[in-house]
Image (tube, rainbow, N blue to C red):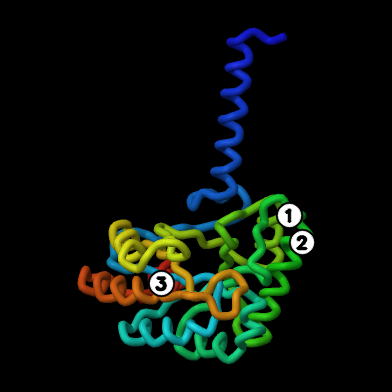
Amino acid sequence: MPNASALAAGLAVGAASLSTAVWAVRSKSSSAFGPSVWHGAPGRRAIALTFDDGPSVSTPRFLDLLAEFNAPSTFFQVGANVLRHPDIARAVVAAGHEIGNHSHTHLNCALKSASLIEADFARAQQAIAGTTGVNPVYVRAPYGVRWFGFRQMQKNLGLTGVMWTVIGRDWRLPADAIAARVLTHASDGGIVCLHDGRDTRHDPDLTPALGALRRILPALRDAGYHFVTVSQLLCHKS
């Protein structure tokens, strides 16, 4: 039987290994499972708003708000939702926004096989391209969870991963708390993650996210930020 010190050392190694694994899977700065970005270069007052899980029946309300503030954004769309709401998916593109791949079924990649991961994201890529005419070049994993096989999927589909500088947690916080969280962590070159849908639900309640966006847009504008897509942020275009 190992002595107490050996047992403690073993537990410490195990804890460190677990911590490293969690960082690799979930951390916004990790590229362990594929090329990934989470912010643009500092030095200019540009910020990228991104929206996950759409399109939904509420997406046009997000588009109206973004148009009011001339805020081109990036929408990471779920393939199944694109097929359910093709006209709304096309409206996002028509409004001048960028489309990214957010899987087909809102897949949690943890413990999934490489073949399943690639098939799901490939299906979304096809749904988005076939519906909107846009071939996404960016991907965001649902829940921010990447796994073995994610890197090869990105390579095969020509996708760069995008995480975030700040996430609004708009699936559980009220509007004022979402806005405060985003505004507190806003920064030059930042990428903000919000949601215009909720996994694959048809008509989720997005009132808190919409309320937060009504606060966030004028506050960031008044702070001197201008809004760009992820592509514009990374390519230093305005």
Measuring from the top left, give residue 129's x and y in whole percent.
65, 82
Could you say which disc has been placed on residue 209 in the image?
A: 3
What type is the residue that disc 1 sits on? Lys
**Residue 132 seen in this snapshot:** no
Residue 40 percent location from the top left of the image: 40, 61
Q: Position of residue 31 (x, y in %)?
A: 56, 51
User: Residue at 55% of width from left, 88% of height from top?
Assistant: 88
Three-letter amino acid code at the position of disc 3: Ala
Rounded to the nearest whole Å, what is the CA distance between mark 1 and mark 3? Answer: 30 Å
- x and y percentages locating residue 225 in the rendered image: 27, 70
Crowding at mark 1 (Cα within 10 Å: few <14, some 14-19, many 20+): some
Given this view, does label 3 or label 2 mark the residue nearer the observer? 3
Residue 140 vertical placement versus 96 (above, below):
above
Q: Residue at x 37, y 59 (%)?
A: 41
Q: Residue at x 41, y 72 (%)?
A: 209
Ranked by sequence position, the earlier of labels 3 and 2 is 2
Q: Looking at the image, do the residues carrying marks 1 and 3 touch, with CB atoms under 8 Å apart?
A: no
Quadrant (top left/top right/bottom left/bottom right) for the C terminus: bottom left
Which one is closest to the eye, mark 1 or mark 3?
Answer: 3
Mark sitting on residue 112? 1
Spatial separation of the CA atoms under disc 3 and disc 2? 31 Å
Asked which secondary structure carries label 3, the reply is helix
Q: CA distance from mark 2 to mark 1?
A: 7 Å
Is label 2 in contact with label 1 (beta carbons under 8 Å)?
A: yes
Q: Which residue is mark 2?
A: 116
The residue positioned 68% from the left and 80% from the top of the image is: 127
Indicate left or right for 188 with 26 as reference: left
